[in-house]
Image (cartoon, rainbow, N blue to C red):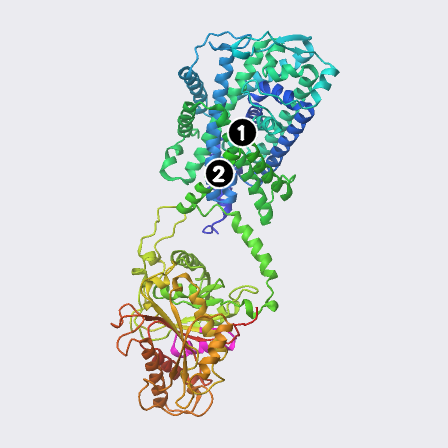
Amino acid sequence: MASESSPLLAYRLLGEEGTALPLNGAGAPGGASARKLSTFLGVVVPTVLSMFSIVVFLRIGFVVGHAGLLQALAMLLVAYFILALTVLSVCAIATNGAVQGGGAYFMISRTLGPEVGGSIGLMFYLANVCGCAVSLLGLVESVLDVFGADATGPSGLRVLPQGYGWNLLYGSLLLGLVGGVCTLGAGLYARASFLTFLLVSGSLASVLISFVAVGPRDIPLTPRPGPNGSSLPPRFGHFTGFNSSTLKDNLAAGYAEDYTTGAMMNFASVFAVLFNGCTGIMAGANMSGELKDPSRAIPLGTIVAVAYTFFVYVLLFFLSSFTCDRTLLQEDYGFFRAISLWPPLVLIGIYATALSASMSSLIGASRILHALARDDLFGVILAPAKVVSRGGNPWAAVLYSWGLVQLVLLAGKLNTLAAVVTVFYLVAYAAVDLSCLSLEWASAPNFRPTFSLFSWHTCLLGVASCLLMMFLISPGAAGGSLLLMGLLAALLTARGGPSSWGYVSQALLFHQVRKYLLRLDVRKDHVKFWRPQLLLLVGNPRGALPLLRLANQLKKGGLYVLGHVTLGDLDSLPSDPVQPQYGAWLSLVDRAQVKAFVDLTLSPSVRQGAQHLLRISGLGGMKPNTLVLGFYDDAPPQDHFLTDPAFSEPADSTREGSSPALSTLFPPPRAPGSPRALSPQDYVATVADALKMNKNVVLARASGALPPERLSRGSGGTSQLHHVDVWPLNLLRPRGGPGYVDVCGLFLLQMATILGMVPAWHSARLRIFLCLGPREAPGAAEGRLRALLSQLRIRAEVQEVVWGEGAGAGEPEVEEEGDFVNSGWGDAEAEALARSANALVRAQQGRGTGGGPGGPEGGDTEGPTTALTFLYLPRPPADPARYPRYLALLETLTRDLGPTLLVHGVTPVTCTDL
């Protein structure tokens, strides 16, 4: 068991001596010793402070004054309903396993995969960076409103100089203080946050007491300029104390102009301001790498913080509506200071909330950046952020984030940044809801969170609510954020990412595919919707790359399975040799860029293995109906890995999840003359077995000579014109058979038509040849075939060829029915007929008898060339002793024809009905 890998080992459940290790220490920066924070200090305190921010002191009057108490409470309920939906998703994911550093980014990336997780993680990081700058800019404005030289309020001290440079200096000094605290570690941050929490709580307590203890008073308002710059008489707002008339006047909405901006307020604009102030629910989750028990602390602490802040907001809304008239609420957003028993304590609360919000944003940003850097999603750009101190503090990520915040401070545009920050937060929240929704829909057995107060309904409603709020707050920022997320996801997809995280998309696909496979009833199949479902048997893919790509073009959206038989007996082996080979074959599929499944088996013989694969490959209504084999001839094996651009380039083995060079995973081609794993007898027997199992058969010869542009994935618009020739009649039975074309002939036509639908073969011209006997009247068979092609919507050039034309002398006369190879003819006569049929096909290819037509090196004839030939494959003889003769005749028939497909169809595949 020691050699076996288990996902549990990634979480360090067992130590080197087998001793149990704490689950919550997994993956923490610097080890489990870095996890020191409790639920209260690590989650409750930062979440409360982030959700309060400056709004709790400076925007209560704004919301109630414009929206009225009833609409304000409705806004608060809607806002917290949206946040609560996301909190439920956070709690579910956090209690489903060990949560490492990175908070929301870790949850999203380990659920939705590195592409989506990395893009949203970077946006969430930028949101925290900008959020820190917004908090600092708001703090500077709050300080200058009281102490600035240009302060206009009635109680301004006017001692600090103002201007862009001074404001930037004040913001930089405050950022230095915040950055210093965060650089020294989470412990100091927690103590500073706790001190800030005490200051804010004391300030709020003084405000609440002041509502009761302070008597009615008139409060002077900021003077407004009159017309032509004249001054207006002093204006006053009224603090009435608890008064039912005041409450009645404040119940309904009374939207007016915002005295700070002059903009007319409405429900959406006021709601956006309120929602902007309470989007800090992830502040505790961002500290997941420093929490002692994140799976317990994150849900418990976040729920407590959300409930506490909701209660405080509701209480302040009621108190303000009972005691302050509409004029005071609308004209003085900072009226708490005017009614306070000790006004400086309100200022301390304002400054403390802004400072704590900036600290929370900066330390949260640094943890997200460190997690992004550790996952190596963005390469060397974020590499410096991996550095940590001995105690596990990612101080380099803090400095990195500090520098970005300083750049944002240079812009100094508070209003613009606020909307962008909120939208970025909402993108992250929507992604968390989507992660939980995906896990719930996937019904994975390992998704069993201990927190059960959620459902897919709450997750889906959370996603929809967050998206709706994004466009309500700022349609431009919402559209830009989704575009940015898409570009980042595309970048990460192009770079590739770790494959060991687990992708919920795979679980969702499995869930949906299983459901629809059960509904795919083979009893309801109809010929109108037939499509080829191919099983290509490959011995060594080094010599089969062209055929592998050609079969991919022939599948027409159907099932495509690469099958391989490993010779051996499981009874005599210590372990299954097939399982370790799947990785190499899947890498082959990726490199060759074909849409194929891989199915491998172990069998004492290739023939028996082919029978296994024909019977058990696929599932339900998706099972192979056509067997594709390479032709059995004496051509020396080629190593296409050396010439194919997709395989000649060395693989990047430096990145996680990349595969080693495929040349090391597959053996070299078989040496000429060396023994084969499959005898000629078993090869023909495999064809016979497939036909007995009612499978169509395709034998491909010389596919390596196909023009390279015809195997590409492009449009195939080349200057060289190519033909695709189809011979729908059995050339080894020239005068027997039913009518002018049978089921097998129609199958040939269908396969050739399917190939013409592929972009690389659009410019190729389809030619159909009909063979006439020496005494058969021309035109009759051609007319019937043209009428059939018209009904089947197949565009092709039809040519009648008189049998014997170009075939040479010595042609035997045939009168009996049945396949030629099953008649009583001698070997010489059979060989002569095969040679004459071969000469007939080559003559119609327009390449003469010299050279191998169809390949780039064959012949000197100018003009159109035949790129691929479809021939009718006769059934193998009933007597197995005649199998070698049958194979020899096929070799003679296809000799020097270039790329050729010998096809035998046993099922109807065409329909003239709508």
What's under tag 1, amino acid-wise?
Answer: Ala
Q: Which residues are magenta?
A: 677-697
2 or 1: tag closer to the N-terminus: 2
**Is 863 on the left or on the right of 115, as rendered?**
left
Q: Nearer the viewer, mark 2 or mark 1?
A: 2
- Visible residue check, residue 298: yes
**Residue at label 2?**
120
Name the residue rendered at 59%, 30% in the picture. 302
Q: Position of residue 215 (x, y in %)?
A: 69, 8
- Whether 691 is among the magenta residues is yes
Of helix, strand and loop, which one carries label 2?
helix
Q: Amino acid at mark 2?
A: Ile
Where in the figure is residue 636, as x and y percent of width and height? 30, 71
Residue 777 among those drawn in magenta: no
Residue 327 sits above or below residue 866 on the image: above
Instruction: Count residues near mark 2 (Cα–Cα under 10 Å), then give few for <14, some for 14-19, many for 20+.
Output: many
Q: Residue 211 is drawn in which quadrant?
A: top right
Q: What residue does disc 1 label?
A: 283
Q: Is residue 447 above or below residue 546?
A: above
x%, y% of residue 391? Answer: 44, 28
The label on residue 202 is none
